[in-house]
Amino acid sequence: MTKKAITLSLGLVVMGSASFAQNLNDAKKAIDAEQYAKATTMLKALVNSQGSKGENYFSLGDVYLRNDYVDSAKAVFTKGVAADPKNALNYVGLGQADLATDNAAGAKANFDKAIATASKKDYLPYLYIGKAYLAQDKPDFAAALPVLQKADELDAADKDPEVFVALGDFYAQQKKNSEALSNYMRALNMNEGLLRAKVQIGRMYKESRAFPESETELKAVIAADPNYGPAYRELAELYMQWANFEPDNFATRSAEAITNQKKFLELTDQSFDSRLRYAQFLFYARDYKGLETETAEIARLYPNNQKSLVIDRLQAYSAAENKNPESLKLLTDFFAKNTDTARLIASDYLYLGKAQLQAGQDSLALTSIKTAVSKDSTNVEALEDVAKALYNNKKYPQAADVYADAIRLNPNGKGSLTNYYYLGSAKYYQYGAGITAKTNPDKRLLVEADSAFAFINRTQPEFTLAYIFRGRIGYQMDDLTNPKGLYVAPYEAYLDLVTVKKPELGAADNEKRNQVEAYTYLAGFYSLTDKAKATDFYNKALAIDPQNANALAGLKQMTAPPAKTTAIKKK
C-alpha cells in the first residue's frame, strides 16, 4: 500500500524557518529518513545561503516530487538550472517532472540535456535518470535499465552504493528477487550501515508475500536503529498487506499496522502531509472512527490547505463508513465544491451512492454507483446493496434489473449465487404482483425466474430454496384445468434431498414448512391419478403440521364423492 497504489494524492506543507544545521548531507539524511518537512526547511535555507549550488535546488525539487508537488518541483529545478547551468541534475529533475505529467518527449529532451551537460565520467545523471523511470506509477523498466547499467559502468570503482540500491529496486519491482537481493547485498558490502538497502530487502519480501521473512528483516533494521522511521512505515505496510491476505487475523494485523504507522509519524514530523499519510493509512486499515477524528482535526488545523480535496474526501468517506447521518451532506458538499469531474474518482461516486442508499434515495444511489462501476469495475459488488434495497422496498422490476447487471458484470463474484437467488425471486414476485393487480403479467418473467433457480440447482445442489421456488413457478405455469405436473419434479427433488440424501438439511423450522408445502402440492396433483400416493403425501404433511388446512381439506375431499381438482393456495 504505497503512495502509487492509491488515488488519494499527498502533498508537502512548507514549514517556517527553523534552526537546522545548514548542511546538504544533513538534509539528505532527513530525506532518507522521510522527514520531508525538516528536509524542506533545511534545503530552503541552503538555497538562500548557497544559491549558486545546483545540488541544493535538485534536492529540494526531489522532495517536492516525492510528495507530488510537481509544479513546485519544476519551479525549483528551473531556478537550479539558472543558478548553476553546469550542474546536470536539475535537468534530470525537470525530466522526472515531465514524466510525472506524461510528457515523455519533454522528459527525453531534458534527460539528454543532463547527459550533454555532465562530464563523460559523471555517473550521477545516469543514476538519477534511471531512478526517475522507476519512480513513476507505471515504471519504464526498458528505459531504466540501460541508464542504470551506464551509471554502474561509470562508477567503475564501486564508490557509490546507491547505484546498486537502484539496480536492486529495478529488479525488486519486477519481482526478480534473486537479482534484487544480489544488488542490495553489494550495496551493503560497500556500506553495512545503509539502512535503506535493508528496508528495501524487507520490502522485497513483502511484495513477494513472504510476510514472516519481511517481518524478520524489518525488525532487524529497527533493532539496529530504533529511530529509523522508514522501517516502521514499511513494517506498517507489511502488517496491512498481511491482514488483507489473512481475513481471520485482520483485526490483529491491522492494529499492528496502525501502531507502526503511528510510530513512523512520531519519528518523521507532525506536518500536514505526515498526518494526512497517517489518516490515509487509517482508511486502509478500516479504522473509520479514528479516521473521522483525525481528518476533522486536520481540517481544523489546515482549513485553507491546497489539498483540501483530499481532506474533504477522507472526511466524507469515514462518515459514510460510520453511518454518520452527516455523510450525505459531506459528500453532496464535496461534489458541489469539485465541479471538475476530472478530479473525481470512482470511490467518490461509490461513497455518494452508499450515503444516498442510507438516506433511502434508491434511484440516485443507483445512478451514482453505476458511475462508480463504469470508472472502476471492482466496485460492482456495491450494485448488490442497491438491488437489495430495491428488493426490500418491493421494487421488484428495478431490483431484478440491477441484480441482472451485477451478475453480468461480476459473474463469479463471492455473492453471485445470492444474486441469482434474488434475481429469480424478484422476477417471481414481480409476476405475482401483476396477478394481484390483474395486469396480465408476461409469463416470460416465470421462465427467467426458473432459469435463475435452475442455475443455482446446477451450481449448488444443496440450496434448498431453489427447488421450492421452481416448484412454485411450475405451479404458476401449469394449466390447472388440465395439469401437466410442471411443479412435480422440483418438489420431488427437494423432498429427496431433505428426507433421503441429506435429512439434516430438513431439520430447521423453515425447512419443515417447505416440506409441508411440497407434500401438499404433490398430493394435490396425485389425487387425480393415484389416491394412495396422494393420501400418503397428505399424511406426511399432517405429521409435520397436524392443523394444516390444505392437507386436512385434501384428505376430506378424497373420501368424499368425486369432485374437482384440489385447489391449493398459490404461494
Image (cartoon, rainbow, N blue to C red):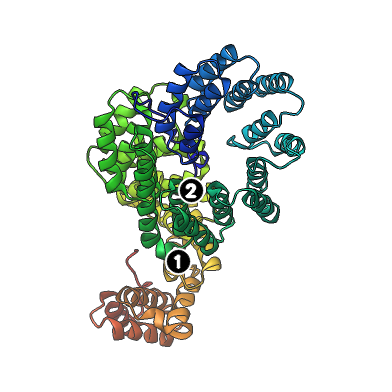
Give the farthest residue toward the top. Answer: 82
Q: Decide which of tag 1 and tag 2 comes sooner along the chain.
A: 2
The quadrant in which residue 11 appears is: top left
* Residue 272 drawn above or below residue 58: below
Q: Residue at x 58, y 11 (%)?
A: 82
* In the foreground, 431 or 469: 469
Instruction: Identify residue type, mark 2.
Output: Ala
Can residue 508 be seen here?
yes
For disc 1, the marked residue is 466
Q: In the displayed structure, would residue 23 be above or below residue 318?
A: above
Q: Which mark is residue 406?
A: 2
Residue at figure coordinates x 71%, y 22% from the top left: 118
Circles 1 and 2, Cβ within 8 Å, touching? The answer is no
- Viewer-nearest residue: 13 or 495: 13
Residue at left offset 43%, top offset 85%:
533
For disc 1, the neighbor class at 10 Å (few under 14, some 14 to 19, many from 20) is many
Q: Who is closer to the viewer here, 424 or 230?
A: 230
Q: In front: mark 1 or mark 2?
A: 2
- Can you give x and y, in whole percent of width and height, for residue 513 in the image? 32, 74
* Crowding near the residue tagged with mark 2, few <14, some 14–19, many ≥20 C-alpha atoms within 10 Å: many
User: In x, y percent, where is residue 308?
Assistant: 34, 27
